[in-house]
Each structure stands twice: as structure tokens, then as C-alpha cells.
Image (spheres, helix red, strand yellow):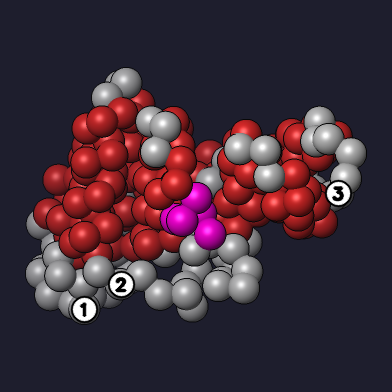
Amino acid sequence: MLIVASDLAGLEDPVAGKKAIGSLTRYIPVDSALAYFGQRPVWSPGWLMGAWNAELGDTAVARRWVDALGTLPAGGTSQDYRGALQSDIEARLAHRRGDRDGAIALERTAMKRWTIHADNDFESSPSPQMRLNLALLLRDAGQREEAEALLTSLVPPTTWLGPVTVRAQYELGALAADRGDTEAAATHFERALKVLGGSGPAASAWAQRARAGLDALPAR
């Protein structure tokens, strides 16, 4: 699951991401989601498979997971965990077909329904991935102040979420550079580079971006 979460954040080798998705698919086939409920963890890997396919894979499979999640028993701590996970997948599908405004509205709905937004979480959990996705959507829509607030919730000293944090550090650096805050941009780029150095191909591409962003800053 962590490999899939890393791929969803853009920092995983795509080959490894596809291999991990294959393993999850064999472990929890979408058509058997309800049958496995209570025997294996279902909603978490099911949501991850749906979100990954919505972003990077087969959108038809993503839609099947939206339907399958709706068949699972209700309850839990979240206001509506099923609806939250469904809305997140739908948000990613909307973005993929070019409906950014629809994607933002759906991701806001996902976050409202999930209700559990703590700092002691995992990168494969819904909340951090929802926050990262909404932040990127808002950034692209020009709503940078809110995007920055969401990204800040994903980095130290608030939390540490592996690839989600590293991606957030890079994005915060880029936002700071755009508004002319050289010190903040350098700090975020440097923090990203400390983790990305010596990483695999996908992460190395982000390291190059962070290095380029750092090198483009005015002399301090």
C-alpha cells in the first residue's frame, strides 16, 4: 500500500506502482470487496486502488471501486467513510477528464465527509492524500493561499508523511518562489532535496526540479 501511496503522490517508480497495484488487486478483487469485508482490510486498499486507477490507470476500474465501496457496511468514526472515499475517487476522475472545478468541489466533499484529519497519520491514509490532491487542484486554480495552508499541514513540524511530505515541500518551495519569498522557497527546496538525494528514477526527477528551483532563486 505504501508503494501505491507513493506513486499517487508522484514519487514512485511507475513500474513498482503497477506491480503493487497488481498485488493489491489479487488480494482484494473489486468484485469480492463485500465478501472479504470482515476477513481482510477492504476499504483502505480498495480506496487506494480506486484513487490510483482514477489518476494513473484504468478509469473503468476506478468506477467499479466507487460502486464497490458503496456496498460496504456503514459506520465507523468518520461522518461518512464510504461517501468520503467515493468522492475522492470521483474528484480524481473529474480532474482527469478536465473538470477542475468539479474536482475541487468533490474533493472538498470528500474531506468534509471523512472528518478525521489528524497529524499522526500515514501516507497511505485518505486524509493526507485528500489534502495533497485538493492543494494541487487549488494551486492550479489560482487559489494559492488555501493551497499553501493545506500543504503546510503535510510537512514538519506538523507531521511527517514520507513521499506526501516531500511532494508538499517541493510545492511549497515553488509557491514561495512565485511570490518572491526567497528564504522560504530555499528552505522548502533544500528540505525536499535532503530526502530526494540518491532516490529512484521518479524521485530523482523531483530532485532535479527542486535543484532547478533552488538554483533559480536570487542570491541570498
Choose the circle earlier in sequence order: 3 or 1.
1
**Left or right of 23 in this view: 30:** left
Measured in 3D between alpha carbons, the distance from the residue under mark 1 to the one under mark 2, in whole angstroms, is 8 Å
Residue 52 seen: no
- The residue singled out by tag 3 in the image is 198
Amino acid carrying label 3: it is: Gly
| Residue situated in front as seen by the camera: 134 or 163 | 134
* Residue 37 locus on image (x, y percent): 22, 68
| Residue situated in front as seen by the camera: 98 or 20 | 98
The reply to whether callout 1 and callout 2 are in contact (CB within 8 Å) is yes
Residue 75 painted magenta: no
Task: Specify the segment rendered in magenta.
Answer: 147-152
Marks 1 and 2: which is nearer the front? 2
Q: Residue at x 11, y 68 (%)?
A: 73
Q: Is residue 87 above or below residue 117?
A: above
Choose the circle earlier in sequence order: 1 or 2.
1
- The residue singled out by tag 1 in the image is 77
